[in-house]
Amino acid sequence: MSVVLALAQTLTNLMIVPAGPGLPAGWKLNRMQGVDPPAFEVTRSHTLRVTAVAQGGTATYRLRPAIRPAPTQRQGTITWRWRTGTPLRGADLKRRAGESRGESFASWAGRNRMVVVLQRAEDADGSWHEERRDPFSDYRRLWNRAPKPLVSVGVSTDSDALKVRAAAEIGDLTWHAP
């Protein structure tokens, strides 16, 4: 008989902070130059709601301690859930045409950022979606070098060029050790 031990670690403090407007303690707003920041709110169901009307910015939560890559091939995964009912059909991080699931490319937002497309605008139907990624494997594939430790997680929105309203929720950010 073998015993399997599952190690899961909640990555943010959303489960313990009270519901209300603004970013909870421990979160940091990174503003986009010349653009008003979006509104953030912790919901009663312990998710972070982001609402932007021609706004943009990123909220990050610093991980303490950082998650270091394992010396083995099995690295672990990050899981989270999200939903939005406002598809931004004109949005594209790379070009003005559509994107495909699984596509990856350098981000225009900075030379040290890469994008992996997980869902399409059509998936923004108001239902909850669950994601699972191995960030260390993604890093190796995208940068072709050994991964660095994970030091933060974040939520970003950028609707200023589209001049439309975008609203989304994210929650249950969890690290699953290998």
Image (cartoon, rainbow, N blue to C red):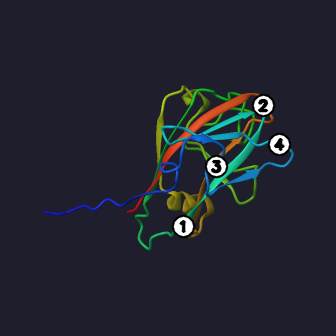
In x, y percent, where is residue 149?
56, 68
In x, y percent, where is residue 54?
78, 33
Q: Which mark is residue 162?
A: 2
Q: Residues within 10 Å of mark 4 (few under 14, many from 20)?
A: some
In x, y percent, where is residue 24?
61, 50
Up-down relation of residue 40 to residue 144 (above or below): above
Q: Residues within 10 Å of mark 3 (few under 14, many from 20)?
A: some
Residue at x 69% of width, y 41% of height: 157
- For label 4, the residue is 35
Question: Picture quarter containing residue 144?
Answer: bottom right
- For label 1, the residue is 64
- For label 3, the residue is 115
Dot 1 or dot 3: first in sequence order is 1
Residues under numbered marks 4 and 2 in contact, where contact means CB atoms less than 8 Å apart: no
Residues under numbered marks 4 and 1 in contact, where contact means CB atoms less than 8 Å apart: no
Amino acid type at image mark 4 = Val
Which is closer to the viewer, label 1 or label 3? 1
- Callout 1 secondary element: strand
